[in-house]
Image: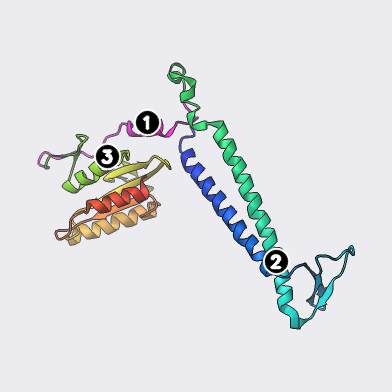
Amino acid sequence: MEIQKMSFPKIMPLLESCIREMEGAAKKIRATLKTFPIGRLRVSPHRGSYQYFHVAENSKQVGSRGTYIPTSQRNLACGLAQRSYNETMTEAFTRGADSLKFALQELNRLEIENSFTAQGPGRCQLLSPIYLPDDLYAERWQKVEYQGKLFYEDEVLLTTVKGERVRSKSEVIIANMLNQMGVPYRYEYPLRLSSGRVVYPDFTCLNVRTREEFIWEHFGRMNDEDYQVKTFRKLDSYAMDGYIHGVNLIYTMENDVRSVNSKTIELLVQQFLL
């Protein structure tokens, strides 16, 4: 059994971010309480509508019905209701933050990330890991063997810094940028669509931090009308299979006038793959 898609380095910052947001919300809401009237609101059904009563904070009478709030003092009823609601939300956010803090402490204490390597090199050789730390997960992902598309004899020989053969100078730039920025990738890794058709995206990339896979297509002949039509069909086909630009699909384009921009590639890598 393997539980490999889960990324604790991804979960931890999310928990920390939620804690900060909840504590910040509680603080802001708590600060509003001084702007509302003191006391509490009692609501009583009356002839298909409601009557409102102001129960003073210092009221010592148990079950006090409070003072009737006439329609002319509607703002008082609104203020008392809002105060009660804001107090409830302050407590909810505070308790939520405390619960997440406890969960974060527990996850840190469990040290799931290091459980496999902590077994020692001798035992690791005998084990089928349930969960791998990020570096080992990326290493295993990168070593998957596959058969990509074949090259024709008349195709230009273009290689990356890793010695891989690719089909265009722009793909060399993309591959080298991915390698430079430490992003594991597979070139023309086969992808079977729901229709049963197998396609070969230019790059299949791994965001190690989130353990999410992105496919990256580079469309290099956007000046060609037939190529444009095929490109849009391909993007539609990807969308039908759940590959959406900016979610799990990245694409870049160029034509005879404008070539691929290395800075753009770097920004896309930073945004989606790190």
Quarter-of-image position of residue 162: top left
- Is 252 left or right of 169, judged from the image as shown? right
Query: Can residue 7 be seen here?
Result: no
The picture places residue 21, in percent across and down from the top left corner, at 55, 54
The picture places residue 259, in percent across and down from the top left corner, at 18, 55
Of the residues shown, which amino acid type is indicated by label 3? Asn
The answer to which of 50 and 191 lies nearer the viewer is 50
Residue that badge 3 annotates:
179
Quarter-of-image position of residue 167: top left
The answer to which of 143 and 60 lies nearer the viewer is 60
Is disc 1 placed on a helix, strand or loop? helix
Residue that badge 1 annotates:
140
Of the residues shown, which amino acid type is indicated by label 2? Arg
Cα separation between marks 1 and 3:
16 Å
User: Is residue 154 one of those drawn in magenta?
Assistant: yes
Say if mark 1 contacts mark 2, CB within 8 Å.
no
Residue that badge 2 annotates:
83
The picture places residue 133, in percent across and down from the top left corner, at 44, 32
Cα separation between marks 3 and 2:
56 Å
Which residue is situated farthest in the top direction here? 122
